[in-house]
Image (cartoon, rainbow, N blue to C red):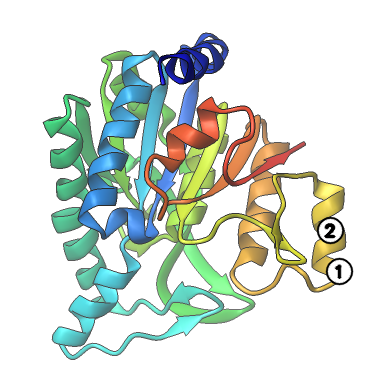
Amino acid sequence: MVQSKEEVLIEVLPYIQKYEGKTFVVKYGGAAQTEQELKTTFAKDVTILKKIGINIIIVHGGGKEITETAYKLGIETQFVNGHRYTDRRMVDVVKMVLAGKINKEIVALINQNDGDAVGISGVDDNLFIAEKHLEEGADIGLVGTITRVNTALIGMFLSNKLMPVIAPFGVGTDGTIYNVNADLAAAAVATAVKAEKLVYLSDVEGVMAGGSLVSTLTESDSRKLLDDGVITGGMIPKINSAFSTLHAGVNKVHMIDGRRKHSLLLEIFTDEGIGTELVR
């Protein structure tokens, strides 16, 4: 057992040296955000990463709880190509659940572990300037696409050793508040700050092909899998967004299974990893 611990420490050291001072953006969602044990291990994991000198920015979702709250209030939930149709009643629910409840729960749990987290939304100091999003020409309500990220605000938090935890809203130039897809918001942040890594933490192991996990995926390989119909459904926009982010300067994008304890640490600090890394 002692030898095993020594090997773990030796394997981790080069990664700590490599990533010290770098910035990771983590999109936090799925079971890791709803199951108590996984929430606790996530809070510990991001605190560990911060303590060893990595800048951590978290963008979180909360779709399941939004749907449940809307149902209790008698508000129907509709999706168009993965985007939640958001009228004025629904945007109020989204704000209440994401900014008022989930964001503060995440911040409190991280701070219980001495992570120095601060909760904000895309509305604060115009963090996310957005415009109305049309899904294939269809009007899906108050859903926004981010056009600008206030990197100065993020830089202020990071320079003061704070961990921003962001609820994904955008604000229009006319003051309209938009619901923004958390995956796309995380990609926009990673692009804007030129992050070393963008990590999607969700309820899938990664990209699967022929029943096996694809550990490393290049753009040419992904195009073949898309053309062959191997990559389908909600994974398609994630893949497209990931490679757009890589082209914009992010070094690597990771898709990992948040249902596995300490998956974030296992992906970053082990040679084999546990999910799919997408590379230029």
Query: Is residue 91 something that shows in the picture?
Result: no
Q: Which residue is mark 2?
A: 223
What secondary structure is found at the residue carrying circle 2?
Answer: helix
Residue 68, relative to residue 184: is it above or below?
below
Q: Is residue 280 above or below residue 178?
A: above
Which quarter of the rendering shows the N terminus? top left
Question: Is 163 displayed left or right of 74 in the figure?
Answer: right
Residues under labels 2 and 1: Cα distance? 6 Å
View extreme (front): residue: 1
For this view, does 94 lie left or right of residue 228? left
Find residue 196 and name its label.
none
Q: Do labels 2 and 1 touch, CB within 8 Å?
A: yes
Query: Which residue does the image show at 57% across and 11% down from the upper left?
Result: 14
Image side of residue 79 versus residue 213, left or right? left
Question: Which residue is rendered at x = 37% and y = 45% of the image?
Answer: 261
Q: Say which residue label 1 marks.
A: 227
Q: How many marks?
A: 2
Q: Quarter holding the C terminus?
A: top right
**Residue 259 is drawn in which quadrant?**
bottom left
- At which x and y percent is residue 246? 68, 38
Q: Amino acid at mark 1?
A: Asp
Secondary structure at numbered mark 1: helix
- The local crowd at label 2, few if under 14, some if 14 to 19, many if 20 or more residues have their Cα within 10 Å, is some
Q: Position of residue 269 (x, y in %)?
A: 52, 26
- x and y percentages locating residue 116 in the rendered image: 20, 25
Which amino acid type is marked by label 2?
Arg
Kindly identify the residue that appears in the image at 48 percent across and 73 percent down. Answer: 83
Residue 64 in the image: above or below residue 95: below
